[in-house]
Amino acid sequence: MEFKVSKELIHQLEEHIVNKNDQELEVLLNDLHHADIAEILDELDFDEATYIFRVLDSDKTAEILLELEDDLRENILSRLSPKEIAEELDELETNDAADIIGELSQEIKAEVISEMLDVEHAKDIVDLLRYDENSAGGLMGKELVKVNENWNVLTCVKEMRIQAENVSRVHSIYVVDDENRLKGRLSLKDLLTTSTKTQIGDIYIRKLNFVNVDTEDVEVARIMQKYDLEAIPVVDELGRLVGRITIDDIVDVIKDEADKDYQLAAGITQDVESNDSVLELTKARLPWLLIGMVIEIVASFVLKGNEATFQKYSTLIIFVPLLSATAGNIGVQASAIVVQGLANGTLKEFSRGYFSKEISVSMISGSIISLLLLGYHSIMYQQYLVGMAISISMIVVILFAATLGTLVPLFLHKNKIDPAIATGPFITTTNDVFGIMLYFGVAKLILGF
């Protein structure tokens, strides 16, 4: 059952904090998961959260740090001494520790590293800090189990026992040569069912997925999703094994990328959250609103240029909102499917087959909508030629919207621009201008105006 923060619990904690009942606080919180405690701390003010943070053991608070909202974590870290922060980092895996220490100022960062008791752990963290945070090197942790291809099974088991003490979860056993170059992976079943004198080089599996330290995080996520991996090894430029990335880190990447794409699709140009300031939220939303305003002004000029047409055929103007909404929806639907295909790797570039399929779907949808529209117009207005002009114009505009929605994301992707930007205001506003132009152009052509 999922934990929910109750007002009663918050009230109890606040009372214990006021009365300095540290033992009672520990009793209330010790059996809770670190993610649940982080949720509780988010409900308290900074002073109360910091007090609880100091009361609990560092092996628990280290995990809590990772779950806290950015503002609260930053505030708590600012109230801890470099030695206290170092104690927290000593309890974390290298990649998590590197993420937290990367948020500190250069001065504090150096002091924290100097205070760490585990020198090897500190060296590994410093090594991770040199990689771009959006690369495989920035995601990976140093904790892993590796064996040499020249060892026998007995030596391998002994060494694995020593290495496993520093690894919270063993996903894979990696095989390297004398130069630490990644050669493959070792099956636990083969290890358990093979003679202790057998050489590892005779039984390890050579086929193995891996990534380079410079591989982008979204590409790592795509590979791990495609091959359903719980972990993937990371190698440097010389093919040497330098770390591994686990699925929990990739889940964060997938979530962040999905959040970014969703915001881009909504016309939000910066990465923002609900608890950001009014100024930050306005700065993120305003650019596309202004662009949309300019494009809609252009659309109004198109309408003005066709004033004589809809004065003679007044029903043409009545269906402009329907035209804009339908074309916008068709365009967004088409672009959303393309962006999804690009994201999961099922669509890598322009495909005639896929383009034909999308146009066929739009043609069928447009024909059904147009026939219904023709019937409605004929019943309501008895202007059959005008109804025919509106219906045919609708089909043309829908096909244009589908073409735009399909090709624009592919063009952006080819030019290294996030195609998610094409699933929202860009498509709808562009359709408004060109859709209206096509609508009146085709209608006038049919009506001989």
Image (cartoon, rainbow, N blue to C red):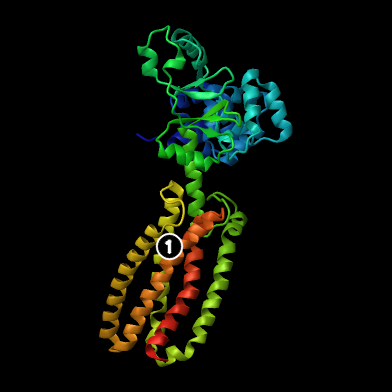
90 is higher (above) or lower (below) than 128: above
Q: Amino acid at mark 1?
A: Val
Residue hosting label 1: 332
Instruction: Name the one closer to the observer, 421 or 44.
Output: 421
Q: Give the quarter of the figure containing the C terminus.
A: bottom left
Q: Position of residue 274 (x, y in %)?
A: 52, 50
Determine the residue positioned at 56% across, 71% down: 293
Q: Position of residue 232 (x, y in %)?
A: 48, 31
Instruction: Name the one closer to the observer, 15 or 178.
Output: 178
Determine the residue positioned at 35% across, 12% down: 193
427 is higher (above) or lower (below) than 339: below
Q: Give the quarter of the figure containing the N terminus.
A: top left
Q: Quadrant of residue 361?
A: bottom left
Instruction: Name the one closer to the observer, 415 or 99.
Output: 415
Element under label 1?
A: helix
322 is higher (above) or lower (below) than 285: below
